[in-house]
Image (cartoon, helix red, strand yellow):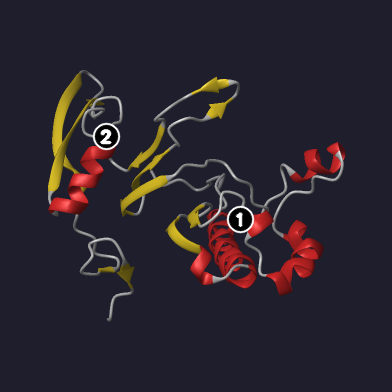
């Protein structure tokens, strides 16, 4: 029998609006903040996601040392349009949960990005984090690849090989599925392309690193 009543618990139109506003905010941050206050010779955008971005700066303290001289006063007046306030503990606590404000979540000295959601970042060789030195720590994103099972694959040298040799490497995922009748569980092993040089969203230039938009 067809249901005569149903309850909509997921307001999909609200989810879509939030998703689109997040994308818009990321573009505003680039064009109205980074590109406005910094000279393009001092930074390069490496990777952008729905709510995060990875940028390379020519100085370890870009917001102190790289702001255009003629824009420093303007930035000091408007920086809290982009970042949480730090003038009082109360303001800092309030802005910590304010949507649309940006904060630094991770810092390293190198990044290799193969495609969207498929990259590796390196920490400096000697970093003090939470009172402990963690040399060589990395941050990895590998969509569709189980990190625990593919630790040997997801290494900095392999990401670099992909770029240098223009190759692909396989990953192995394992898991289980409950069959439709619910009577038994089936395990599976899946081999798939884990790391790949091929990138179909932008055109890769001859240096194998830089990209430009597709001419379509």
- Compared to residue 203, the image places residue 195 above or below, namely above
Q: Identify residue for label 1.
A: 62
- Compared to residue 172, the image places residue 164 above or below, namely below
Q: Position of residue 156 (x, y in %)?
A: 28, 38
The dot on residue 155 is 2
- Compared to residue 73, the image places residue 176 above or below, namely above
96 displayed left or right of 51? right
Q: How many marks?
A: 2
SS state under label 2: loop
Residue at position x 52%, y 51% from top?
A: 52
Q: Position of residue 80 (x, y in %)?
A: 76, 57
Q: Position of residue 54 (x, y in %)?
A: 48, 53
- The quarter holding residue 152 reads top left
Q: Position of residue 9 (x, y in %)?
A: 57, 44
Query: In what quadrant of the picture does the N terminus appear?
Result: top left
SS state under label 1: helix
Residues packed near mark 2 inside 10 Å, few (<14), some (14 to 19) or many (20 plus): few
Query: In what quadrant of the picture does the C terminus appear?
Result: bottom left
Out of 209 and 139, give the one closest to the viewer: 209
- The quarter holding residue 202 reads bottom left
Q: Look at the numbered discs 2 and 1 and tell me whether their residues touch, using CB distance below 8 Å.
A: no
Residue at position x 60%, y 21% from top?
A: 131
- Determine the CA span between mark 2 and mark 1: 29 Å
124 displayed left or right of 35? left
Q: Earlier in the sequence, mark 2 or mark 1?
A: 1
Out of 72 and 168, give the one closest to the viewer: 72
Single out the residue that lies furthest toward the bottom.
216
Nearest-to-viewer mark from 2 and 1: 1
96 displayed left or right of 89? left
């Amino acid at each position: 029998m067809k249901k005569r009543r149903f309850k909509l618990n997921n307001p999909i139109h609200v989810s879509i609006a939030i998703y689109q506003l997040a994308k818009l905010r990321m573009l505003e941050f680039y064009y109205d903040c980074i590109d406005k206050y910094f000279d393009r010779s001092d930074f390069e955008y490496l990777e952008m996601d729905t709510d995060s971005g990875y940028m390379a700066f020519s100085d370890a303290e870009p917001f102190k040392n790289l702001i255009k001289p003629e824009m420093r006063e303007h930035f000091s007046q408007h920086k809290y349009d982009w970042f949480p306030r730090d003038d009082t503990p109360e303001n800092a606590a309030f802005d910590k949960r304010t949507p649309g404000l940006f904060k630094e979540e991770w810092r390293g000295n190198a990044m290799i990005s193969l495609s969207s959601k498929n990259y590796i970042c390196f920490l400096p060789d000697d970093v003090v984090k939470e009172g402990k030195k963690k040399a060589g720590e990395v941050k990895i994103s590998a969509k569709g690849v189980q990190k625990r099972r593919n630790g040997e694959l997801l290494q900095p040298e392999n990401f670099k090989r992909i770029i240098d040799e223009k190759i692909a490497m396989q990953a192995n995922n394992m898991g289980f599925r409950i069959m439709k009748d619910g009577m038994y569980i089936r395990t599976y092993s899946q081999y798939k392309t884990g790391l790949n040089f091929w990138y179909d969203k932008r055109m890769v230039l001859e240096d194998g690193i830089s990209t430009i938009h597709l001419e379509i």
